Image: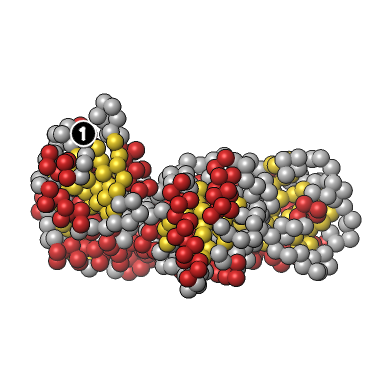
Amino acid sequence: MKTHKLLFIALLGLLLWASCTQAEDSTDSQTETQEETSEEASQETTEEAEEEAEAPKKEKTTEIEEENNVMILHINNFERALSENQYLLVEFYAPWCGHCKQLEPIYAEAAEKLKEEEPELRLAKVDATEEKELAEEFDVGSFPTLKLFINGDRKEPVEYTGKRTTTGIIQWMKRRTGAGAEALESADSAAQFIDAHNITVVGFFESLDSEAAQVFKEVAMDTPDTEFGVTATPEVFQKYEVKGSSVVLFKKFDDGRADFVLSEEGKLDKNNMTTFIKQNSLQLIIRFSQEVADKVFNSGINVHCLLFMNSTAESQMRLLEKFKAVAKEFKGKLLFILIDVSEPLSHVLSYFAVSKDDAPTMRIINMDTGKKYANDSEELTIDSLRQLCQEVVDGTAKPYYRSEDIPEDWDKGPVKILVGKNFDSVALDPTKNVFVEFYAPWCGHCKELAPIWDQLGEKYADHDDIIIAKIDATANEVESLDIKSFPTLKYFPAGDKEVIEYTGERDLETFSKFLDGGGVLPKEEKDEDDDDEDDDDEDEVDEKKEADKAAGDSKEPNESAEEKTNKTSKDEL
């Protein structure tokens, strides 16, 4: 399980996508390996095989057919396509891959536009499940995989790193096949270039053949949604008061420009420059929109201050202007995001326990830890904003945890209803053995489990020392419990014993054996294969799924997996 991925989506992802359509996903998150989808592939492949058995396969020749302006390639015509097209982007796909299906209309639209605007830039696709020889040659390990072939070179194709949108594909192709950075040879040409765009990045180098200049051009190639210019002309240096080699980001907001100075050795670090561009391309206070979502996600700043304001209230907008001073003080440490409560953002407001009437107010969320913070004072002022930001940066702020109100009949049924406010008093009762289901209302597996869980509650209703309970983990949070999947089942034994995460079969008989055994699974239930199958059944903690119902979205960043433990001591809780 990828911890940062889950935080990235489940926490801020809910915020940023709850009220808008799909934003661009990172390339790593939109691929499927054959192992991840083997069951789906097996089922669909079987169905397709039956259909294909009825119709004879078409003979493969060197002829190149097109489907929606996308070339259909295979082992017999691949070399011809490379030889006849200077720039050819090839998608290696699997018919059963969900991400491939999502990309298909986007890819076709980009192919059509490029064919009209830039006929030398063409798009093609290869069914990698059918063309195994090509898939092996180009090291295709996940779907979809996109590679750019230039001048027929099949030895070193360029991996696609752009966004999976029509605009993203077109921008990436044009950037990769062009100069990357526009040469600014005079003060007038530089001024025209900078004035023509909202954000421009200009490299000032004493020599355009220097190592730093080459690194600059590499960054330009990898950042197709930003305009780059480069110059070695003294007149341009003088006009913009630049001394020595450096990089300047010009912008039509906030301070107007940001300077990135090279090291004393005159070297330019690619990663540092990329981070500099990402962070300085954002406004001090970012008004959330679909257009900026991708930049917010990839800013590299993981502590976000959310300002809940009503744009129809002039007094609140005036207050927002004053907050820019605080945003400038914490630039590079916190990202400030405006959430307009007058827009349909019910999911966001609910997630942060904010109502429209609470505006103006604020919340801070740490993407690395998932912890959230709120200001103690009733009134949001510059001083209260600055104080909470400083406490979060210093690590002295106290996080808050969401909780619904305790239902009046929470303990009346066979399954006890827990919320954040009564969780500790019930689940951590040293005299009781408490079996808790952490569920999500939208989770299909949770719905399947519901009747079985009710039966379990009824079966043990007369046991004074056993409590069967459930808690909506999307609306309630428990300190020190990191719920990563739904449903998650945890057994809190009486006394000072360790908390046990249940990983067995989800049926009444196995549950009963587990409880009767004092929280120990029968030996046959501990098989590793069973554990693996059970893990596959779990729905990821993806509160974005809730937003997906309204927004139709699917993004998540690729981070290294963190080892997941099954036990947490009550002392830690």
Q: Who's the residue at 40% across and 64% down the image?
A: 289
Nearer-the-camera pick, 480 or 93: 480
Q: Give residue 373's position: percent from left, percent from top.
A: 60, 52
Nearer-the-camera pick, 72 or 572: 572
Location of residue 69 with respect to 132 vertically, above or below? below
- Left or right position of 485 against 58: right
Color style of the picture: secondary structure
Q: Give residue 255's position: percent from left, percent from top.
A: 33, 51
| Other residues around mark 1 within 10 Å, as few (<14) / some (14–19) / many (≥20) | few
Location of residue 551 with respect to 435 vertically, above or below? below
Q: Give residue 13's position: percent from left, percent from top.
A: 49, 57
- Left or right position of 344 against 358: left
Nearer-the-camera pick, 151 or 22: 22
Q: Is residue 308 visible?
A: yes
- Residue 378 lies in what quarter of the image? bottom right
Mark 1 residue element = loop
Q: Who's the residue at 22% across and 68% down the image?
A: 68
Q: Is residue 158 visible?
A: no
Q: Who's the residue at 65% across and 55% down the image?
A: 376
Q: Who's the residue at 71% across and 67% down the image?
A: 451
Residue denoted by label 1: 244
Nearer-the-camera pick, 111 or 410: 410
Which quarter of the rendering shows the C terminus? top right
Residue type, mark 1 in image:
Gly
Q: Give residue 114's position: percent from left, percent from top.
A: 18, 62
